[in-house]
Amino acid sequence: SQTIHQWPATLVQPVGSPLSLECTVEGTSNPNLYWYRQAAGRGLQLLFYSVGIGQISSEVPQNLSASRPQDRQFILSSKKLLLSDSGFYLCAWSRQGSEQYFGPGTRLTVT
Amino acid sequence: DQQVKQNSPSLSVQEGRISILNCDYTNSMFDYFLWYKKYPAEGPTFLISISSIKDKNEDGRFTVFLNKSAKHLSLHIVPSQPGDSAVYFCAAYYGGSQGNLIFGKGTKLSVKP
């Protein structure tokens, strides 16, 4: 069966510090991978998606970036965090044309 | 511009009664719709889906109805249980095989015993 892991589960970072969130998927190959953010009181916002190694598409311009160094690894990064980057970050995977399955999420608080 | 709208931020229902969660969309190119359930501090879990070629899909206590002419879908939960208390997100597909989902803002369902 397929599983998706995210870490860390919670993170408190000061403004201006860097960020690296990691997501890995097990039990499948060549998945589509996604990063979402849920800000307080808002819905799920798609940040990045990837259909293959090294292929990243950005949905929202911001100070975040994503990378996919391996088939089942997806990384969300920032060089300098802003207060507005606080939120709940979710990684998801899917096979082509099917529903998405979400990881447990990372709660990021920027202070 | 919101392409998927859940106009009710919250809904309270008595245990055993029916819960009806509504969702409207504006893009007629959407061809696949999904409902996700989310507990606090957890990732959303897939609940049920419906293709645009159908008007109803049922899975146990959960039924999703699609009205394409009205660009409206609804999720019915019968009977509602306290464990159903969660935020429910409606989502719609665009982008073909890439499978990019557009989510609504969610409806918080509270089922009271």
Image: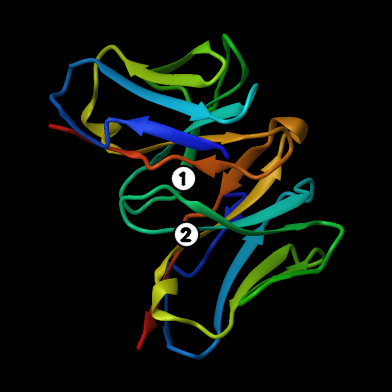
- Protein chain holding label 2: B
Residue B53 horizontal side relative to residue A72, left or right: right
Residue under the image location 79 percent in, 45 percent down: B29
Colouring convention used in this rendered image of the protein: rainbow
Tell me if mark 1 has few (under 14), some (14-19) or many (20+) residues whose alpha carbon lies within 10 angstroms of its own: many
Residue under the image location 44 percent in, 73 percent down: B84
**Label total for image:** 2
Residue under the image location 50 percent in, 53 percent down: B45
Residue B89 horizontal side relative to residue B28, left or right: left
**CB-based contact (under 8 Å), mark 1 and mark 2:** yes
Which residue is at the front of the view, B79 or B56?
B79
User: Which numbered disc covers residue B68?
Assistant: none
Indicate the position of residue A22 as horizontal and vertical percent values.
Answer: 37, 23
Residue under the image location 59 percent in, 42 percent down: A100
Q: Amino acid at mark 2?
A: Gly
The answer to which image quadrant residue B20 occupies is: bottom right
- Protein chain holding label 1: A
Indicate the position of residue A109 as horizontal and vertical percent values.
Answer: 20, 36
Q: Dot 2: what SS?
A: loop
Quadrant in which the C terminus of chain B appears = bottom left
Q: Is residue A102 above or below residue A82?
A: below
Indicate the position of residue B24 as horizontal and vertical percent values.
Answer: 64, 62
Q: Amino acid at mark 1?
A: Leu
**Residue on which the image places disc 1:** A44
Outermost right residue? B53
**Residue on which the image places disc 2:** B106
Q: Dot 1: what SS?
A: strand
Q: Is residue B70 above or below residue A86?
A: below
